[in-house]
Amino acid sequence: MGIIPAAGISFPASVPLLVIGAGACGLVAGLAARDKGTDVVLLERDPVPRGSTALSSGMIPACGTRLQIAAGVDDAAGIMAADIQKKAHGEADQAIVDAVCRSSGSAIDWLTDEHGIELTLVTGFLYPGHSRLRMHAPPSRTGEELVGSLTRAAETAGVDLMTNAHVTDLVADKNARITGVRLQRPDGSSEYIACESLILACNGYGGNPALIRQYLPDMSDALYFGHTGNQGDAIVWGVALDARLSHLGAFQGHGSVAHPHNILITWALMMEGGIQVNAAGKRFSNEHRGYSEQARAVLAQPGGIAWNIYDQRLHSMGREFEDYQQAEQAGAIVQAADYSMLAKKTGIPADALMATLEQVAACVDGYEDSFGRDFTTKPALEPPYFAVKVTGALFHTQGGIVVDENARALQADGHPFPNLFAGGGAACGVSGSADHGYLSGNGLLTAVVLGRLAATAAVKQIDGGL
């Protein structure tokens, strides 16, 4: 895998725009290109489009959308950008943050109005770090439904999708212009396709153990809850092309994956009053910091295990999520009439669990929590109690190729490549340098918005206007 010199390479097929990857970023890029009348081919290594999008909760943050306005939500690009930078400790590229926030609302309206993607504004709770209700998700609140809807829209729009097409090499001339790609088929045969412009939409390196050891050594033994196809192809090509790379140690983790069932348990349970305890029955963190950094906190507990503890009110809310329904059907959810029965079913020491629940109840009444969490805004937990055993996991990486406001990939000297663009996990995101900077939805935000921006700029480049 690498870069092949263009000299002497002949291409039996050619297309104006190639997109590597058919997750949310690639599918959105394909839709945007077809809207401009440009022929585009999406190259997907898997038999069907899924990627990291299918494993997500399908929630796309955006501001100023019609759905927000209809719900009376006062949001704007500046407010959203401030939320992102606050979570990222100011480490994200401000120009990119501003660009994706500024374009997020129109992207959601475009998907719903022009391409029939059914999205709803998620109400009832705020995810960590968001000051406004701005999550837009399909009715099931699953990434599986989102990628399915995008795939159908792409087919309707005439986007050509080539599956079982694993791109192994980029072909570039001496001026770093991409002239085409080489792809490999399942039977081992290879094909060359020429292009006038190329978009990398092939996600990060979470599925590549060697790159994890190199860039995220302390997560080498963590459960990987991402797509196995995330092998870091864009990183490898970026290094070979001498592209500018940044924040390769950034990632999205999650501190609430049902164990051993490997089913995502919504963090809304924590935000609305639930708690996490370790096997000894003790809380170990402020659960409202964010679910990404909570992965490391959970993994640091004995056995890398924690228990989510909550009540009937939150159990009913959890059932609004299809993943939670699956966890319940799989037997991951424990129910008990009181704390002593809950202790018996979970193996948590009863006296410790009782002490923790009493401490939390006191915090609800206004006593200061030693971890800094504010419990006073939500109702106290009350029996019957519910619990689910969880572990921490690595979802996907957030660093990558640095892009400009038009999603053009940048060379090491800061100048854009002649015809190379990147979005989603292939591009450096807006989550800063580590796990703590991930604001809920950042991954799909940059996938959708940068995918659309990349295609718009690529079409201009093809037409000679960029």
Image (spheres, grey):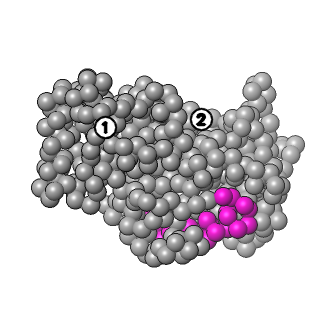
Residue that badge 2 annotates: 229
Which disc, if any, is residue 385?
1
User: Badge 2: few (under 14), some or many (20 or more) residues near its Cα, within 10 Å?
Assistant: many
User: Badge 1: few (under 14), some or many (20 or more) residues near its Cα, within 10 Å?
Assistant: many
**What x and y, as percent, mark residue 8?**
79, 42
In this image, 183 relative to 433: left or right?
Answer: right
**What x and y, as percent, mark residue 96?**
49, 66
The residue closer to the viewer here, 5 or 446, is 446
Q: Is residue 194 above or below residue 135?
A: above
Which residue is located at x 28 percent, y 40 percent? 383
- Res 299 → quadrant: top left
Which residue is located at x 19 percent, y 41 percent? 357
In this image, 89 relative to 25: left or right?
Answer: left
Q: What range of the chain is rendered magenta?
A: 91-118
Number of on-image labels: 2
Q: Is residue 22 visible?
A: yes
**What x and y, as percent, mark residue 120?**
58, 60
Q: Is residue 222 above or below residue 407?
A: above
The prevailing secondary structure element of the residues shown in magenta is helix
Which one is closest to the eye, mark 1 or mark 2?
A: 1
Label 2 amino acid?
Answer: Gly
Which residue is located at x 77 percent, y 66 percent? 35
Label 1 amino acid?
Answer: Tyr
Secondary structure at badge 1 equals: strand
Secondary structure at badge 2 equals: loop
Q: Quadrant of the C terminus?
A: bottom right
> Would residue 62 be counted in the magenta stretch?
no
Spatial separation of the CA atoms under disc 1 and disc 2: 39 Å
